[in-house]
Image (cartoon, rainbow, N blue to C red):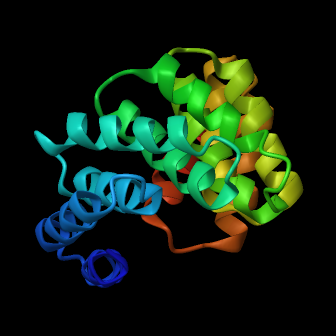
Amino acid sequence: AQVELLTGLFHLARGEYDKAIQACSLCLAADPDQVHALVNRGIAGRCLGGTGMREAEEDLTAALERAPADRSVAAPALLNRALVRMSLGKTLSAIADFTRLVDLPELEPHERVPALLFRALCHMERGNFEAAITDNTEVLHLDPKNLQALLNRGVCFVQRYQFDKGLADLSTAAAFEPNDPRLLCKLYVFRAL
């Protein structure tokens, strides 16, 4: 089973998601308790998209149920299940998974950044701009030059009619990345408000 697990991981790293799923399935046939094979098969299914998303969600859920306290399982399973759920339009479930991930006690501060950014996007999608501002602000405490957090928070401020704050975030982002067309376009529009 270990050979199939490593083969699946190799294919996953190479972007050969169908082969990764096959190898992980072989691993699970030999050792049904191999939770890392469930996680890797779930990640491969998420990367494939389409009909594989529901199976990916099932695999990642099964891995979390079998090893909820194992960080090497919980962190990638929560992140990927949340991304699957975002793709399936299950934003409340995705927010819950991102929150569980952010709250993992062993998580390093820099490991929290992707979960906070994605959770902020879910909040933005639901129109909860205050929560999105909070998550993006937390990202900026961890990574003060994070362009995505500055851009997203700036948009949220504008949605909340706090134009000066929105413009300040976009101006800061543009200073870090002066040739980014996303920032320049939004900055141009926001200056006109």
Q: Position of residue 148 (x, y in %)?
A: 60, 54
Say if residue 45 shows up in the picture: yes
Q: Position of residue 42 (x, y in %)?
A: 32, 51
Is 182 drawn above or below residue 17 in the view shown?
above
Count of labels shown?
0
Quarter of the image with the N terminus is bottom left
Give 26 or 153, whichever is nearer the viewer.
Answer: 26
Give 66 or 178, whichever is nearer the viewer.
Answer: 66
Quadrant in which residue 136 is drawn: top right
Q: Give the residue displayed 17% in from the left and 76% down from the top.
A: 16
Q: Position of residue 134 (x, y in %)?
A: 79, 31
Q: Give the residue displayed 28% in from the left and 44% down from the top.
A: 56
Q: Give the residue displayed 62% in from the left and 53% down from the top.
A: 75
Give 103 or 164, whichever is nearer the viewer.
Answer: 103
Quarter of the image with the C terminus is top right
In the drawing, does residue 166 fall left or right of residue 14?
right
Is 151 drawn above or below residue 172 in the view shown?
above
Residue that extends furthest to the front in the rendered view of this protein: 30
In the drawing, does residue 45 fall left or right of residue 139?
left
Say if residue 192 shows up in the picture: no
Q: Position of residue 29 (x, y in %)?
A: 21, 58
Is 182 drawn above or below residue 23 in the view shown?
above
